[in-house]
Image: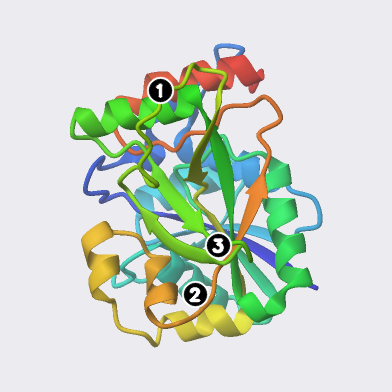
Amino acid sequence: MSCLVVIPARYASTRYPGKPLVELTGATGEKKSLIQRSWEAASSVKGVDRVVVATDDARIRNAAEAFGAEVVMTSTDCRNGTERCAKAHEVLGGGYDIVVNLQGDAPLTPHWFVEELVAALVADPSAGMATPVLRCDGRALNGFLTDRKAGRVGGTTAVFGADNRALYFSKEVIPFTSDTYADGDSTPVFHHVGVYAYTRAALAAYSTWAEGPLEKLEGLEQLRFLENGHPIRCVEVSANGRQFWELNNPTDVERIETMLSEAGIA
């Protein structure tokens, strides 16, 4: 099946304006922009036919084309990354069987996350959409809790049923646990990794649905699928010793640079 990876990126982020162009220092001391690191992560995925950056901003387009990325310009009317992916897919002719949304603030996404995601959707196309979840160790969970106490959103958590179909996603830490965990402990909380794979039909349908109340409250685009009764397959992935984090706030820069260094990412 043909597969397109789209990296949606916008300059006017509410929490961190201009973040796609923020420079991050890797393990060798080299500085690269967030959008370049996300593109390099996407380009390492096996079995992908095409990788594009989708944006509505000339500054991001110019920066992406400078490091060799293919760019698709999309409307400023796109309200989230899924809508931008749908528009980019349409601009490119709409012919891909699977479209992957690898968000432009997730440079630590390992290639096997996306590969396992696509494989799961191919095996279960009735879901229409799949997304990876990563069981938090104590270090990750404690980071989430610290951020929430400080009034920051550290990431999104997910809960799902025995059939691996999503029940809910939230920027709060769910499910609640009163236990305490050391850094290396396994926890019952799953970090939702900001990657989505859609079938062509599911992605096309998304743009026809109105934004629902839960999506508005949480600011989470995937809730539109659940609010419209559309199943989401959660795919549990393994970090294989690597840490994963999205760049949501300026304070995340130092944290991500530490993780780039630990993972040996140049």
Q: Is residue 11 left or right of residue 180?
A: left
Q: Position of residue 124 (x, y in %)?
A: 73, 73
Using the image as rendered, state which of residue 204 and residue 172 is in the foreground: 172
Q: Are marks 1 and 2 in contact (CB under 8 Å)?
A: no
Relative to 177, does residue 194 appear above or below in the rendering?
below
Disc 2: CA contacts within 10 A as few (<14), some (14-19) or many (>=20): many
Which numbered circle lies on residue 238?
Answer: none
Q: Is residue 240 left or right of residue 38?
A: right
Residue at 23% across / 66% down in the picture?
216
Q: Say what amino acid the circle numbered 1 marks.
A: Thr
**Element on which disc 1 rests:** loop
**Residue at position x 43%, y 74% in the image:** 226
Residue identified by numbered label 1: 180
Viewer-proximal residue among 209 and 10 = 209
Q: Which residue is mark 3?
A: 161
Report the Cα–Cα distance between label 1 and label 2. Answer: 41 Å
User: Element under label 3?
Assistant: loop
